C-alpha cells in the first residue's frame, strides 16, 4: 500500500476537524473514499463552486450518504461553503448533517442515507441530460454493503437498456459493511462479473492510487454504448491504523479528545 | 378514467417538453401514440417500482415533469421509501398515477387491493393526494398538474364511472366541491364514493331529508375551510371513502374538526374499509357490499347520525 501524500492527509485532517466538531461520524466509510473524491473534484468533474446548480455541471451523486464527511471535506476545500462549517457537523442548526441533503448543502445533488437510492436517481439524471442534449456526466458512488439493496440492480438493468454511456457507477469496495466482512454478511463476489453481466463496461482500480484512479476516470466513457462500472478496491478507515479494516470504526459516536488526538497524530 | 389520465399525459407532452411518461410493465400498447411521437420521453422500465420512482426523481431533478404509472399497491407499498425519500424529501414534481384504487382489483385478491394507499400517502410531508370521481374531472385535474410544484399521488377508479362532475365546478387542487346542497346532513366524499353518496342523498330526499354532498377530490392538502363551513351548517356528517377507515379522508376531517371546530366532532361518522385485508374475491361491487359500503348503508349511517344528533 502506497503512503498517503500531503493532500490526502490534508483532506483527512479536514474530516477529523468535522469529527471533532460533531463528536461522531462514519469514519471508516469516509476514509476509504477520500482519494476517489479527491481525483473527481481535482481533475475530472466539471463544476462551479460559486454556482453549484450550474446547468452544465457534471452530476456527482454520493449514494453512500453515510460517507458524507469525505464529501463535505472536499466541497469545503473547493469553496462550495466556508471551511469553518465543518466544525459544526451534526450540530442542531448546521447544514452539514450525518447524511447529505440536496438544497441544503451546496454541491450535494441528492439527499441520501437510505441506501440504494443513488443509482436509480443517477439513471434518471443521465436520461434527462441525454434528452436535453447535454454532454454532462453522471457519476454515482455506492458503498459495497449498499449494493445488497435490490434497487441498485433494477437501476443497473435500466442503465444498460438505455445504453447510458454518460453514467458511471463507482463502488467503494472496502469489503467491510456494518456488521463485518462483506464476504460473510452477503458476499458480492464475483462483483466485477456481476456488473459486466448487467451490461456495464467494467474496470477495477486501487481506490487509493491517485494516479490510477485519475487514469481510469479520464478514460470515461469506457464504452460508447454502455454505462461504466468501476470497482474501487479500498481500505475502510484508510490512514488510521487502529481503524483500518476494523468494523468497530464503521461509525463512532462519543469520540473523546484522546481519539481525536490519535487521529491527528496518524496524519502528522 | 385511466384512459383519460393517460391520454392527458400525451396531450400535456405535446404542449410541454418537460413531460415524460414512466411505466413499469403495463399492458400492451399503453400510450402507443405518445411513444411513437415522443420516443425520448416515453419509458417502460419493467417490474422495478423502486427504480422507476428513483429514476423519475432524477428526471425531475433535471427539470422534467415525470408521470409514473402502475398498479396502486405496487406504487405505494413496494417503493414507499423511494416515494418518501426520493420524491417527498426532495419535494419534486413527480406524478404517481395509481391504477385500481380500493376494490377495483377484487378478483385478484388482497395483494392487489389498494386499501391503505391514501392513508400512507397522506402521511408523507410534501405529498399531494388527489382522488377524482370521474373521467371529466380527471381531465380537468390533469391539466392542473403541469405546474404544481410538489409530488402528487393520483388514485384511479375502475373506469366507466358515472360522470357526476360538471365543468362549472372547475378544478383547483386543494379545493373541494359542493356537489349537492342540503341542510339536514352532509356526506363528505372522495373518488367514486361521491356517486354513491349522491345516490344515497336522493334516497334520503324521498324521506324528506335533504342532505348535501361535498366532494373532496384533494385529500391532501385538505380544504379545511370549505369542508368545515358545510359541517357547521348541518346536524350530521358522514365521511365516505373506498379506503381503510384509519388515516384517510375521514381521519383528515376529524383532525380538522378537532383543531378548528371541536364542537362539531360529535357530528361525524366515518364509512370506509374495515381494518382487515379482504377475504373475498368477486367484483368491486360485491366487495364494497361486503365492506358495508353501499348507497343503502350510507343512507342508514346518515339516519343513525341524525338520530344521535336529535334531528327528526
Image (cartoon, coloured by chain):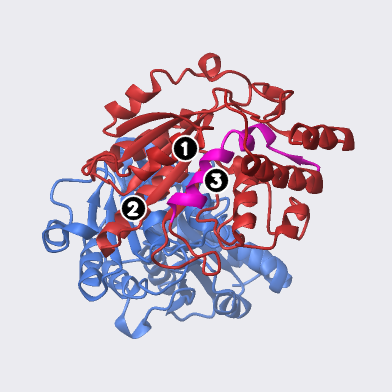
Chain colours: A red, B blue
Measuring 62% from the left and 37% from the top, which residue is drawn there? A5
Chain letter for mark 2: A
SS for tag 3? helix
Q: In the picture shown, does residue A158 fall above or below A246?
A: below
Residue nearest the observer in this picture, A53 or B138: A53
The quadrant of the rendering that contains the N terminus of chain B is: bottom left
Chain letter for mark 3:
A
Please name which of the two marks, 1 or 3, marks the residue nearer to the observer: 1
Mark 2 → mark 3, Cα distance in angstroms: 22 Å
Up/down of A82 relative to A32, above or below = below
The x and y percentages for residue B139 are 28, 72
Q: Position of residue A62 (x, y in %)?
A: 52, 46
**A189 sits to left or right of A240:** left
Mark 2 secondary-structure assignment: helix
Q: Quadrant of residue A50?
A: bottom right
Residue topped by disc 3: A38
Q: Nearer the viewer, residue A268 or A57?
A: A268
Residue A126 is labelled as 2
Question: Which residue is tagged 1?
Answer: A211
**Spatial CA span between label 1 and label 3:** 11 Å
Residue under disc 1 on the same chain as residue under disc 2? yes
Q: Residues within 10 Å of mark 3 (few under 14, many from 20)?
A: many
Task: Residue at 68% x, 59% y: name it.
Answer: A95
Span shown in magenta:
A23-45
Amino acid at each position: 500500500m502506497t503512503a498517503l501524500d500531503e493532500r490526502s492527509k490534508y483532506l483527512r485532517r479536514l474530516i477529523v476537524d468535522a469529527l471533532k466538531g460533531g463528536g461522531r461520524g462514519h469514519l471508516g466509510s469516509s476514509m476509504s473514499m477520500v482519494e476517489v473524491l479527491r481525483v473527481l473534484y481535482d481533475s475530472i468533474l466539471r463544476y462551479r463552486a460559486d454556482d453549484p446548480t450550474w446547468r452544465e455541471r457534471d452530476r456527482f451523486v454520493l449514494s453512500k450518504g453515510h460517507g458524507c464527511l469525505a464529501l463535505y471535506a472536499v466541497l469545503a476545500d473547493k469553496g462550495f461553503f466556508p471551511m469553518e462549517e465543518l466544525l459544526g457537523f451534526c450540530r442542531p442548526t448546521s447544514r452539514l448533517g450525518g447524511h447529505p441533503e440536496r438544497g441544503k448543502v451546496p454541491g450535494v445533488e441528492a439527499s441520501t442515507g437510505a441506501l440504494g437510492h443513488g443509482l436509480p436517481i443517477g439513471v434518471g439524471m443521465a436520461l434527462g441530460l441525454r434528452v436535453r442534449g447535454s454532454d454532462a456526466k453522471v457519476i454515482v458512488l455506492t458503498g459495497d454493503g449498499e449494493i445488497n439493496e435490490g434497487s441498485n440492480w433494477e437501476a443497473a438493468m435500466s442503465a444498460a437498456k438505455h445504453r447510458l454511456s454518460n453514467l458511471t457507477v463507482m463502488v467503494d469496495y472496502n469489503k467491510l459493511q456494518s456488521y463485518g466482512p462483506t464476504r460473510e454478511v452477503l458476499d458480492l463476489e464475483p462483483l466485477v462479473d456481476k456488473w459486466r453481466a448487467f451490461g456495464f463496461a467494467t474496470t477495477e482500480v486501487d481506490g487509493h492510487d491517485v494516479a490510477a484512479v485519475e487514469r481510469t476516470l479520464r478514460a470515461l466513457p469506457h464504452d460508447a454504448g454502455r454505462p461504466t462500472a468501476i470497482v474501487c478496491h479500498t481500505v475502510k478507515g484508510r490512514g488510521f491504523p487502529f481503524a483500518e479494516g476494523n468494523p468497530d470504526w464503521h461509525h463512532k459516536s462519543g469520540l473523546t479528545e484522546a481519539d481525536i488526538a490519535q487521529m491527528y497524530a496518524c496524519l502528522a | 378514467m385511466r384512459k383519460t389520465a393517460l391520454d392527458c399525459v400525451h396531450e400535456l407532452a405535446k404542449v410541454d417538453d418537460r413531460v415524460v411518461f414512466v411505466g413499469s410493465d403495463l399492458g400492451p400498447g399503453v400510450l402507443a401514440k405518445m411513444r411513437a411521437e415522443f420516443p425520448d420521453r416515453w419509458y417502460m422500465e419493467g417490474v422495478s417500482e423502486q427504480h422507476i420512482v428513483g429514476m423519475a426523481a432524477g428526471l425531475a431533478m433535471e427539470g422534467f415533469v415525470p408521470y409514473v404509472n402502475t398498479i396502486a399497491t405496487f406504487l405505494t407499498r413496494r417503493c414507499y421509501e423511494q416515494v418518501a425519500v426520493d420524491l417527498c424529501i426532495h419535494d419534486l414534481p413527480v406524478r404517481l398515477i395509481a391504477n385500481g384504487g380500493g376494490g377495483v382489483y377484487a378478483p385478484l385478491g388482497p395483494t392487489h387491493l389498494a386499501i391503505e394507499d391514501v392513508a400512507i400517502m397522506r402521511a408523507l410531508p410534501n405529498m399531494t393526494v388527489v382522488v377524482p370521481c370521474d373521467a371529466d374531472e380527471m381531465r380537468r385535474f390533469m391539466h392542473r398538474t403541469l405546474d404544481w410544484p410538489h409530488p402528487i399521488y393520483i388514485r384511479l377508479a375502475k373506469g366507466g364511472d358515472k360522470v357526476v362532475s360538471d365543468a362549472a365546478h372547475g378544478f383547483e387542487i386543494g379545493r373541494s366541491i359542493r356537489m349537492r346542497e342540503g341542510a339536514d346532513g352532509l356526506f363528505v366524499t372522495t373518488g367514486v364514493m361521491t356517486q354513491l353518496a349522491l345516490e344515497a342523498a336522493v334516497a334520503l330526499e324521498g324521506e324528506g331529508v335533504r342532505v348535501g354532498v361535498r366532494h373532496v377530490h384533494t385529500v391532501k392538502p385538505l380544504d379545511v375551510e370549505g369542508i368545515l363551513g358545510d359541517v357547521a351548517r348541518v346536524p350530521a356528517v358522514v365521511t365516505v371513502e373506498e379506503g381503510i377507515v384509519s388515516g384517510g379522508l375521514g381521519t383528515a376531517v376529524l383532525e380538522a374538526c378537532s383543531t378548528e371546530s371541536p364542537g362539531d366532532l360529535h357530528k361525524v361518522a366515518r364509512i370506509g374499509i374495515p381494518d382487515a385485508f379482504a377475504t373475498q374475491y368477486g367484483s368491486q361491487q360485491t366487495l364494497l357490499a361486503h365492506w358495508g359500503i353501499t348507497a343503502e348503508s350510507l343512507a342508514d349511517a346518515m339516519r343513525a347520525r341524525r338520530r344521535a344528533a336529535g334531528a327528526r
